[in-house]
Amino acid sequence: MARANAAYYARRDPFADFATAPEISQMFGEILGAWVAVTWQGMGRPDPFLLVEAGPGRGTLMADMQRLLARVAPDCHAAAAIHLVETSPRLRAVQAGALDGRGVRPVAWHDRIEDVPDGPTILLANEFLDALPIRQFVRTAEGWDERFVQGMAFVTRPASDLPPGAPLDRPLPRGEVLEVCADALGVARTIAARLRRAPGVALFVDYGYDGALWGDTLQALRDREPAWPLADPGQADLTAHVDFACFAAAARAAGADIHGSVTQGALLTGLGLFVRAEQLARGRPPVEAHAIRDAAQRLAAPDRMGRLFKALVVASPGLPPPPGFAPASHQGAMP
Ligand code: SAH
């Protein structure tokens, strides 16, 4: 599955198959740009700092954030050195186009988070973790089987190894599936170690669950329609829901603080999404105003992306919680 997904991101245009939050509306990047500015203030305004995005796709989120920062937080914009973690050469070229002329410093690309140089950091990752390969384990009377792909079918065999950090204590009934994303746990540990060396905050937004849950969530999307995950490897987008509890536990065990998770709806609403939507809609023709309000609903309404998508912060020990993750009475004002 790892290889099928790498082939997919290298070859196909993923955004023909699904729409991510930054592609739905510029408001997503603007709200998170304001979040970056306030988080940067909370870190003591380090200059320079690394503004890192993992899995930036078309570069839309970073471009929208940069535009907002240049306008409302020029000090933060000037201090930010952009580092993008992206494996696909084709998407790197798209990102370069989207960010051309937006920043003060040249953009740097890296294959892995480990390769990003040390320093004060604000990292964002939207729909990055769900693209990483998972393994599926099935609870048996004696222990665990693992599901493998053989030809066009799934087969199960007794598991020969279980990834460190897998939540094996969850009370799964026999026959139920536990998904483990060892790569995501590796990201959690890498980021936690990084944030212990220098101050920083990392925001992960993705769809998934937070709690001692389980179940088979592997899905394939092709041309916006669900597809059979094993058909035509490399032609469909393969994803699984993110296990935020397991991810948070790995980061915490590696010495980082955790804030959240909160739902995407609560985060964006708390940071002023609907206020921004009204600002943008004002004075527009009714059709455009309706589209703006509908995009805000799509991002934040519980029955759309608002509840399934969650946001989790991994932070250096002792930093104040970033905006949207603090008790309401302590929340900083947005610029
Ligand atoms: N954040 C973007 C794109 C999400 S798609 C958005 O919200 O629109 C997932 C992104 O992660 C793509 O850019 C893909 O090429 C990248 N990606 C997938 N696996 C990766 C890996 N192992 N390392 C680095 N980037 C990866």
Image: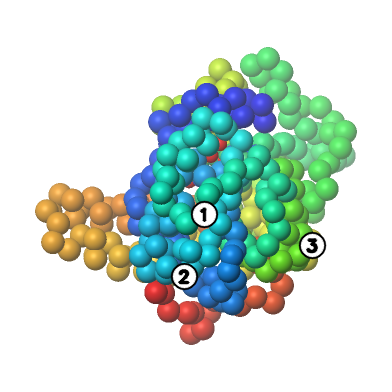
User: Which mark, residue 333?
Assistant: none
* Residue for badge 2: 75
Mark 1 lies on a secondary structure that is loop
Seen in the image, is 193 located left or right of residue 222?
right
Examine the image and state in which quarter residue 276 appears: bottom left
Amino acid type of the residue that numbered disc 2 sits on in the rendered structure: Asp
Instruction: Measure the alpha-carbon separation of dots 1 and 2.
Output: 13 Å
Q: Residue at x 73, y 26 (%)?
A: 148
Residue sitting nearer the eye, 94 or 218 = 94
Residue sitting nearer the eye, 237 or 178 = 237
Q: Residue at x 35, y 53 (%)?
A: 26
Seen in the image, is 158 located left or right of residue 303?
right
User: Which mark, residue 253?
Assistant: 3
Q: Are marks 1 and 2 in contact (CB under 8 Å)?
A: no
Ligand 1 within 8 Å of the CB at mark 1: no
Mark 2 lies on a secondary structure that is helix
Residue 207 coordinates in the image, percent (x, y): 53, 49
Residue sitting nearer the eye, 39 or 141 = 39
Amino acid type of the residue that numbered disc 1 sits on in the rendered structure: Arg
Does the image show residue 20?
no
* Residue for badge 1: 105
Q: Are marks 1 and 3 in contact (CB under 8 Å)?
A: no
Residue 313 coordinates in the image, percent (x, y): 60, 63
Q: Extreme bottom residue here?
A: 329
Q: Residue at x 75, y 66 (%)?
A: 196
Instruction: Measure the alpha-carbon separation of dots 2 and 3.
Output: 35 Å
Q: Are marks 2 and 3 in contact (CB under 8 Å)?
A: no
